[in-house]
Amino acid sequence: MMTKASDRNFSSRKTVRISEMAIVYGMINSPIFKPRNKNNRENKFFLLLKQFFKFQRAVFAMIHGSVWMYKVGSQTLGFFAIAIAYCSIIGINSIHLASYWKPLAIGIVPVVVLIKPWDALLIYWKQDIASSFIFYYGIVFLVSATVHLVMTWLGKGNSSSTKRGESWLVLILSRYTRVNEYFICGIVEPLSSIGIGLLLWFEYRDLYGCIFMCVIGLSEGTQQLIDQSHKAHIDSILKA
């Protein structure tokens, strides 16, 4: 029940947080790493697979949101997450990594960096690629995400540590009309990325670029939907 002293602007987000502190906290409290956990090995394997999928989804959503957003929350990205995200981009775009290994690029690319000479790495990074679009998108992401990270370090991030940022599109449209933030961030922007992906395929036959944009668009849309549904559930309890 809501009281007069209750915060009627309460905001809650359910999706995975991927800052360094959030990752450490998650590892410490994860049932996977607890020795007296009641789950057997098979259950722990599926739990690990589930958490890996959620983490991957959060990383792909960050790859999407870093370009569309500004003033992000401190819990939504970190140096480690940015490095992992860029490794994923490199792995997805590499012609040397078989398609069935690309979902594991997070772990494979760092090993390649350690064992290969720098001249070979430069060729892998810039020349032996499947999509020029992914290459340039990766650079834009790396620059924007680094700026976001530095801003959070300087205390200039979002007042909500779990919010993935303020939308540039919402900022522009709000100057002319009243907009629904979820509709823009959770539907319009993800569908725009998917549309760009389809355009890459139909106009340029860029299969990897198409898949990449569809995946990050769907990841962001899923994240937004989970957060919005959780917030609606909490609001229904507080305002009952």
Image (tube, rainbow, N blue to C red):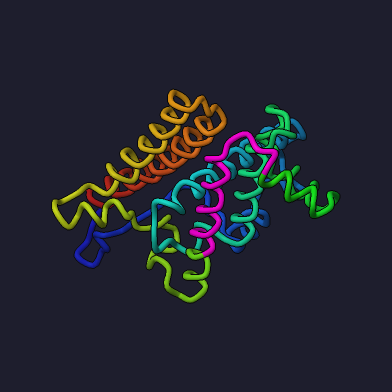
Q: Main secondary structure of the magenta part?
A: helix
| As drawn, 156 above or below 211 | below
| As drawn, 177 above or below 51 | below
In the image, taking residue 198 as reference, residue 25 lies left or right, namely right
In the image, taking residue 31 as reference, residue 218 lies left or right, namely left
Total of numbered circles in the picture? 0
> What residue is shown at x 50% (from left), y 34% (from top)?
215
Q: Nearer the viewer, residue 39 or 28?
A: 28
Magenta stretch encompasses residue 136? yes
Q: Nearer the viewer, residue 226 or 208?
A: 208
| Residue at the left extreme of this rendering | 177
Q: Residue 76's x, y, as percent?
A: 50, 57
In magenta, the rendered stretch is 127-146
In the image, taking residue 217 as reference, residue 89 lies left or right, namely right
> What residue is shown at x 31% (from left), y 58% (from top)?
10
Q: Residue 141's x, y, as percent?
A: 52, 53
Which quadrant of the view contains residue 90? Answer: top right
Q: Residue 94's x, y, as percent?
A: 68, 37
Which quadrant of the view contains residue 81? Answer: bottom right
| Residue at the bottom extreme of this rendering | 154
> What residue is shown at x 39% (from left), y 64% (from top)?
71
In the image, taking residue 190 as reference, residue 57 lies left or right, namely right
Which quadrant of the view contains residue 183? Answer: top left
Magenta stretch encompasses residue 235? no
> What residue is shown at x 55% (from left), y 53% (from top)?
139
